[in-house]
Image: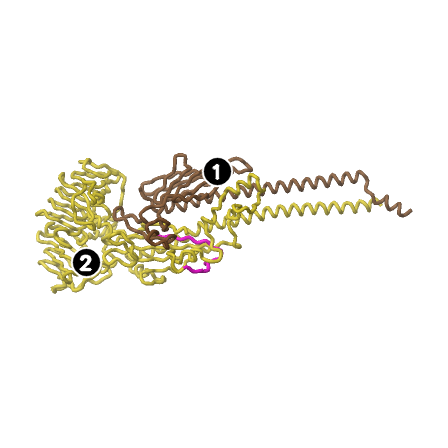
Amino acid sequence: MKTKRNTEDSGSVLLVVLGTILILSIIGANVLLNCTTRLNTSSSQVRAWTDALSAAETAGDIAYAEIRKSNSADPAIRASQWVGWTQSGQTYTSPEVTLGNNNLKGRTVVDKCYFDASGVFKLGTDPSGNIWYRIRSKGTVPLPGLKRTGMDDALVADGQKHFAAFGSTEMQDITARGKGDSLLRKIDFRYDHFAATYGPKGDGLNKALVPALYAPSISRRIEQIVTPVTPFSDTAIKSATTFYGLGSAAQIDSYDSRKGPYVFVANNPSDPRYPDSRYGSVQINSGVATVKGKVYGNVSTNGGTVTGKTSNVYGSIDNNVPFTLEDYYLPAALSARVPQAAGTGPAQLPSSVTSNKTLTPSTAGTLAAPVYYRIADLTKVLTVNPTAAGTNTYVALRVTGDFNGNQAGITVNPNVHLEIYFEGNIDVKATNLKNANPNTTNPLASNLQFYGISPPRDANGIPKFSQTVSLDSGTPSTLAMTFYAPGADITIKGNPDFIGTMVCKSFYANGNVSWHYDRALNTVGEVLDYRIASYVEDTR
Amino acid sequence: MKAGTSTKTDAFTLAEMMIAMAVATIILAVTVTASVALQRSFTAVDNYFATHMQQIRIVDYLARDVKRGLSVTSSVDKQTVTVQIPRYIIQAGDPEALVNPSLIGTSRPPTLSLTDLNINYGTTTSSVEYKVVGASILRTENGVVTTIASSTDNLIPETIDVELANTEYTTTAITFKPISVADRNGTVVYSTVYLRNRRRL
């Protein structure tokens, strides 16, 4: 009898124990479920938001690499530019790329653009300048799981209850947290909120309900401006090794030809042109720079000192500005072209200019595709006319040998834009270098540009010969030109009035030169590379 | 006779009842204790995680602004950060908006400064300030205040900006005191961000 009763009671206790375990398990599982769901949702959103920017920046990098292909020395790479992209006018759209392990998507739109003389942004190609690019990229990352908000968007600003006890310290904390996640990380649950609210281009036009690439997903957008890197940038003289000069009565200052002809205002802060007058800077990549004349700009060295009349430097002296000048090669676009046939006609040049010659090209050419001539030597005066009076004419002249002799010279007449690529040496009287574009009184340095092709190097990397440029001013006159010759030793004698800039291996000038850097040169000249000049995220 | 026998046989003894009640009480106590502990644990974990999310939110806000910033300065106490960012979006009161109010909220094209060759968006920049006010971390952009984090867990962000020869970066460290531990050890989150448009203003 007792045995039977005991058996029945044990059964009840077992049930109670099992029930208790079940209840505890349910509570525990609920805690874990709540924690992990909220953790996973919020973590995914944080990760996706960060990844979306990586995807957008990757798309921007792809576009940047595509732009730089135009400067490659490899014809195959140049030919592959924009392959696979969709072109519409001056706009290129990339194919959609998939990145990483989380199915990141990137797409970018590249617009050719430029800034006019007033600095106003224009879409398209600058008829008289280099091409800029605007890159607009979008990165999208899918969010795993259901369409959930972040944890802080389910809070109680509107009186809804959260998990903590109402009125408790935890509740006060939760109430005070604010609602920041959805302001920061905008989730597209079904539609692309950007296209619906601001239009596909963000300009308020063509707003439409466009299904999101993934639902849900997070997208981020960036805009980058890519500027061409040109040889000159607010530097009157840039020397990779030594610098000496100018004469003690010389001076270097600057102006901006876009705002009018040169006048000396570097000592007059009240003049409206004064802000452009103190960019006559000198950059030296050696330890010692000897300054004698006045420098209305900065002087920098590579870990060295500035000696001489340092009080003549009106800008700053910085002895920690190293830089590298790479060897300069004939631009890829020119090397791929066939020069005009040699001859004696008015639109032709002989293989060597050994007697005075007047050249009148039969076509005007363009900045991107100038009329291209090639000669071996230039020992007399070459006068270049426009193809017709008043017609801007762009000419590129390659001199494979030397440009020298007391009677050697160049005359650039109005409307002519001449680029000379020399592979040998230059030794001429500066008075024979005449730039008359737009006129002889206020010529623009950008209309006569010299580019020194760096001497080839031997197996040890040593240049096979020293390239030299020697300008003997003769009778002082106004010289307006630019030199970009990173492999050349430049020597200037006499006291010319010089407008322009020189980039060279070494520089020596002992005359009382009046040197004016034209700030308009900052955006002209041969494109050496491209760089990203601006980065902004569209946070809408 | 049989009925009387049956009644006596089915009853519990006092000892049995005491034991059963004691066991039941223990089980109930365990259940309640475990429930409370789990609830507290959940609250603590939830609070910790929620505050951690705020740390990340502060870091993300700062990273977004510093990365596109033109310049950044941090205060001596490291708790106030001011960032100048491009004025990419046309806002009410801007010159373009005065001419054409429908442009408010749209992006503006860049301009090139011929003086310093910088790319600008508009003639002015937007000023963004991050500041600790009481238990709140406020983000103020052109006078518009947003509470991006606020906590009785006493969040403390500290940011320093470091200028290099050719760039600038910020380093941020954020700590808090969890309600369950009341100790900042182990709660720090670090972030380092470089300026993409670093500019001397």
Q: Is residue A445 above or below residue B17?
A: below
> The chain coloured brown carries which letter?
B
> Which segment did they paint magenta?
A207-223
For the question of whether residue B141 can be seen, the reply is: yes
> The chain coloured yellow carries which letter?
A
Mark 1 residue element: loop
Q: How many marks?
A: 2
**Chain ID for label 2?**
A
User: Alpha-carbon neighbours of circle 2 within 10 Å: few (<14), some, or many (≥20)?
Assistant: many
**Chain ID for label 1?**
B
Q: Is residue A332 above or below residue A181?
A: below
**Nearer to us: label 2 or label 1:** 1
Q: Which residue lies at the image location 24% right of the left edge and 47% below the top edge?
A: A233
Q: Position of residue A112 (x, y in %)?
A: 30, 58
Mark 2 residue element: strand
Which residue is farthest right?
Answer: B1
For the question of whether residue A61 can be seen, the reply is: no
The kind of residue tagged 2 is Ala
Left or right position of B176 against A430: right
Circles 2 and 1 on the same subunit: no
Whether the magenta-drawn stretch holds residue A210 is answered as yes
Q: Report the residue marked by disc 2.
A: A396
The alpha-carbon separation of the residues under discs 2 and 1 comes to 68 Å
Q: Report the residue marked by disc 1.
A: B135
Q: Is residue A279 above or below residue A218?
A: above
Q: Position of residue B64 (x, y in %)?
A: 41, 47
Q: Nearer the viewer, residue A342 or B33?
A: B33
The kind of residue tagged 1 is Ala
User: Alpha-carbon neighbours of circle 1 within 10 Å: few (<14), some, or many (≥20)?
Assistant: some
Whether the magenta-drawn stretch holds residue A237 is answered as no
Left or right position of A129 against A409: right
Q: Quadrant of residue B78?
A: top left
